[in-house]
Amino acid sequence: MGMGLSHWKLIFKKVKNWSKDVGSWGLFISYDSMFLNCFEHASFQNWFKSIGFSKSRKAYIEGKVDTMTDLNEIMDKLIAMGSEQTKQIFLRHGAKEPLFGVKVGDLKKLVKDVKKDQHLARALYETGNSDAMYLAGLTVNPKTATKEMLQDWVRRANWYMLAEYTVAWVAAESPYAMELAREWIKSPEEMIAVCGWSTYANYISITPDELLDINEIRQLLKQVEATVHDEMNRVRYTMNSFVIAVGTYAAVLHEEAMRVAESIGSVHVDVGATACKVPLASEYLRKAKQAGKIGKKKKTCIC
């Protein structure tokens, strides 16, 4: 467009100040060409990332999203739904900026509309905004997820809610559930390993016992029993949850899971400045048995 970098800096200084005041993303819709041009300047990359536009430009440029209108509308709604109180709660739990602080219950109000547009659902994750990323996990169709997409998602899951829930849920219902769970469990990176254990646990909860690799699950139970107390912090949590999932949803392995639960006892996890507690697996399984829930599969693990 023939404008120098200094002109762009001036424009975006004004845009940045204005967007803080009104929380609107609409200006980018009116100036599509300016939007694309500015993304080419490294000077603006950090700012775009801070407001949640880290990689949605890729979907935009490649034509996967015809316009940014729908994405802007959803982001505007997330801004309106967010609160400083909820944001601070998430930050205490380990969330990373950027995020608006939207309650999960409020995110679910947007699921029906977003599900209609799978390009939009994926573009939400690409924003890098934690609220938008969680919403993406609730709306993307896991059956159409590619292995490349899931690998990208797990690498960018920067706190436990995204790793243990968002990515794990989608991966567990994807065609690559077991392949990725086995790979991720072995990762030296905490959030990826966390996602691996959670993916496997969720897969067990929705898959008939006759389709499960029972011998492999037995080996994983032995691994938990032998190593859980020496693992990375959130990995300890998901290993404990894995024992609970096996004992609850795989009826054939209930007794073995109960033995392991009693063997490992209380699992310590640093949950920071929160009131969260790690469930005692043996107590959880006893209550599940008393309630007649053993072996009852879930229709979906995405919730």
Image (cartoon, rainbow, N blue to C red):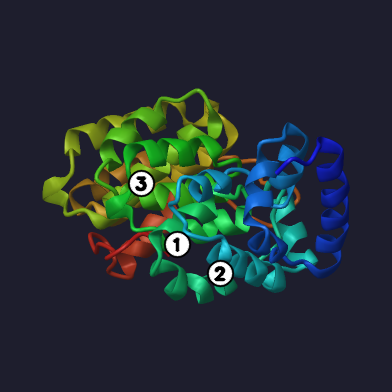
Residue plotted at (62% across, 55% down):
32
Q: Distance between the residues labelled 1 and 3?
A: 12 Å
Q: Are marks 3 and 2 in contact (CB under 8 Å)?
A: no
Left or right, 216 with reference to 86: left
Examine the rendering and report whether any part of residue 73 can be seen: yes
Q: SS for tag 1?
A: helix
The earlier-in-sequence mark between 3 and 2 is: 2
The amino acid beneath tag 3 is Ala
Q: Choose the circle earlier in sequence order: 1 or 3.
A: 1
In the shown orientation, is residue 160 left or right of residue 263? right
Front-most of residues 53 and 255: 53
Q: In this view, does 86 lie to the left or right of 255?
A: right
Say which mark, if any, is on residue 171: 3
Q: Can residue 262 be seen in this view?
A: no
Image quadrant containing the N terminus: top right
Q: How many labels were placed on the picture?
A: 3
Q: Residue type at mark 1? A: Leu
Is 296 displayed left or right of 69 in the figure?
left
Establish if 110 lies above or below 34: below
- Disc 3 to disc 2, C-alpha distance: 20 Å
Q: Which of marks 1 and 2 is nearer the N terminus?
A: 2
Nearer to the camera, 64 or 222: 64
Q: Nearer the viewer, residue 292 or 19?
A: 19
Q: Position of residue 216 (x, y in %)?
A: 23, 32
Residue designated by label 1:
138
Q: Look at mark 2 in the image and give the residue it sits on.
A: 107
| Residue 9 x %, y % | 85, 43
Q: Do the residues labelled 1 and 2 touch (CB within 8 Å)?
A: yes
Q: How crowded is mark 3: few (under 14 residues within 10 Å), some or many (20 or more)?
A: many
